[in-house]
Image: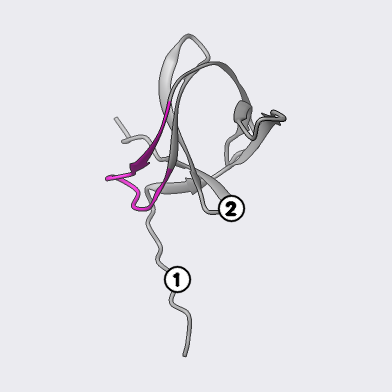
Amino acid sequence: MEEKHYYNPNKVYVSVKAVFNPDGGCKPTSLIWEDGREYEINKVTDVRRAASLKAGGVGIRYTCKVGNNREVYLFFEEDRWFMERRDPR
């Protein structure tokens, strides 16, 4: 059976630097966007299992503050990190 790949232009896979604690917890400390720019995560305000309605997929959603305290969602889905692409405004 052939594996099908789902493509969604709103889903951006990113590289993430994180700290893994002895108790099994994970805290992302920065993310690297698809253009190579690295953004420091100032604070993680919430962690929960959630779906990305815009990009599709379910995983652990980290609500993060980056830059000038802009709130973004960072998802850990199975073994990969992704974010939702911003609406071009």
Applied colour scheme = one colour
Instruction: Say which element carries label 2.
Output: loop
Pinpoint residue 63: horizontal percent, then vertical percent: 43, 25
Pinpoint residue 58: horizontal percent, then vertical percent: 38, 50
| Residue 5 marker | 1
Mark 2 and mark 1 residues within 8 Å of each other at the beta carbon:
no
Which residue is drawn at the image coordinates 57% and 42% (left, top)? 14
Judge whether 83 appears above or below 6 on screen.
above
| Mark 2 lies on residue | 79
Pinpoint residue 84: horizontal percent, then vertical percent: 40, 40
Amino acid under disc 1: His
In the image, the segment drawn in magenta is 47-59
User: Considering only order in the chain, which callout, 1 or 2, is on the residue closer to the N terminus?
Assistant: 1
- Quadrant of residue 81 within the rendered picture: top right
Tell me if 53 is positioned left or right of 17 in this view: left
Instruction: Say which element carries label 1.
Output: loop
- Mark 2: few, some, or many residues within 10 Å (few <14, many ≥20)? few
Q: Residue furthest front?
A: 23
Judge whether 40 appears above or below 86 on screen.
above
- Whether residue 48 appears in magenta in the rendering, the answer is yes
